[in-house]
Amino acid sequence: MTHEVFNQAPPLVDTNLYLSDAVLVDAVKREGGAWGHEDIAVLGAVLGTAQAQQWATDANEHEPRLHTHDRFGNRRDEVEFHPGWHELMRTSVTHHVHSLPWVDHRDGAHVVRAALMMITAENELGHTCPISMTYSGIAALNADPQLAGEWLPRLTSAEYDSRFGPADGKTGALLGMGMTEKQGGSDVRANTTRAERIGDSAEYLITGHKWFCSAPMCDAFLILAQAPRGLTCFFLPRWTPGGKRNRFEIQRLKRKLGNRSNASSEVEFTGAWARLLGEEGRGVATIIEMVQHTRLDCVLGSAALMRGALVEAVHHARHRSAFGKRLIHQPLMRSVLADLALESAAATVLAMRLARAFDRRSGTLDERAFARIATAIAKYWVCKRAPAQVGEALECLGGNGYVDDSVMPRLYREAPLYSIWEGSGNVICLDVLRALQKEPACRDALAAELENTGAIPTEVPAEADARGVVERIAVELQASLLNRAGLGDAAAALRRARAGNMTFGSVDTVSAGLLDT
């Protein structure tokens, strides 16, 4: 026989994505989310099944299809998704991954939701875009109590309604976002999309485009446009209050490196109806609340990819033998895996500490200041580490990890996304420098979290040094949090490993003891 299969890892199925992650379980309890333990475990069990894994595979292999017109030539502007996508969306909405802190006001709600988001993204990342947009957009929508009163019951509903029609006839709704344009990118003040006010009302007609519009099949969007007083935030639904299709035209879907299950799009507005959100001329100040929450989700998504890649690598090494013994027992492979486990743990404790700050930032200035600066620090560092982590984990599987039958190529394609989304690395690092320079409370809150405050520069560094500064602060912050979690050996190993030895497995991290967690 030439086709007998042996020395191959079995399918990694029926594993609870939450309960199998000891670092995450402990972090949830430590950061105030113990009351959500059972609910997170329920979702973790669902997402670890072969069925949920198949939904993820199908949603990515059968990419969304855009229908711009019907057969008679009328504008249609609808996106068709595979049933696997809808199952993923239904699962996330049912478990309130899109809305938990806005419907459950217990302390720790953002922490519980962060854990739900992490295990959801570990299963499949693409569909978390509209989930994240809705969670984040609700935070900004509170700037208009009347608008919030009308839309929050729809946006926080635990029912997923994929029908394309006016939101007032649906059992649930989702929120998207459109900020960047062809000529501007991260420089949103260069936007040229125009907003013309209708009389003396809060209603406007929007004309222009968005180069990236997240999740175009959402029911409404927060967008930026130039009004008479400057860049302004608007709430733009897919259907007008009169029940007509809004002048929201999808030009094409982006062909992307990864995130293939998600429909990123280019759209044009040709006199689209919208409502003012916040004040004219203060669009960035209004939408920044949404951006702050989506940056948290960038950290959570990256940490989830890092954990997922680690789990796949360890699973393979536990079952695969080479040169007379299992890979997990080969000293050099064990060193690499231990370092991957260390990096995953560091990302997780930082992400969950950040979520706790979101829970408590309305109550204390210290937590609000910490959330302000730590979100940017974590967004830069964790999102930068994810591609390196996934690439190294993929190599642990050898050729088996490089073929698309494995989940690893999908994780690898997803990994760079969060370093780009909601501000690329340079933009984020400059944001950290601004906070250090102009917001003393941020510096004080950061110093209170660090064991080694020497990582915070006494003088504002030059822009060219920003990446190194943020990296050093991030590593010290992670080490401090690992210590606080009772993982002192891991904290020491992290400092050694990240002190100029950036190749996984190049220093002793096995002694940190995280490989078996």
Image (tube, rainbow, N blue to C red):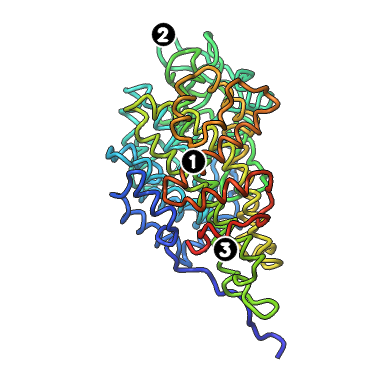
The reply to whether residue 214 is visible in this rendering is yes
Q: Mark on residue 200? A: 2
Asked if residue 496 is positioned above or below residue 313 in the image, the reply reads above
Q: Nearer the viewer, residue 473 or 507?
A: 507
Query: Could you tell me residue 165's position as x and y percent?
Result: 43, 39
Q: Is residue 151 left or right of residue 13?
A: left
Residue 72 appears in the rendering: no
In this view, the residue in front, 306 or 488, is 488
What's the residue type where badge 1 is placed? Answer: Asp
Outermost residue, bottom side? 1
* Image coords of residue 337 (percent x, y): 60, 61
Using a 10 Å C-alpha cutoff, classify the residue at mark 1 as few (fewer than 14 neighbours), some (14 to 19) or many (20 or more). Answer: many
Mark 3 Cα shell of 10 Å, populated few (<14), some (14-19), many (≥20): many
Q: Which one is closest to the eye, mark 1 or mark 2? A: 1
Res. 216 mark: none
Identify the mark nearer the N-term, 1 or 2: 2
Q: Label 3 is placed on what type of residue? A: Glu
Q: Nearer the N terminus, badge 1 or badge 3?
A: 1
Q: Position of residue 80 (x, y in %)?
A: 54, 49
Distance CA(mark 3)–CA(mark 2): 58 Å
Residue 16, image quadrant:
bottom left
> Disc 1 marks which residue?
297
Name the residue that disc number 3 marks. 312
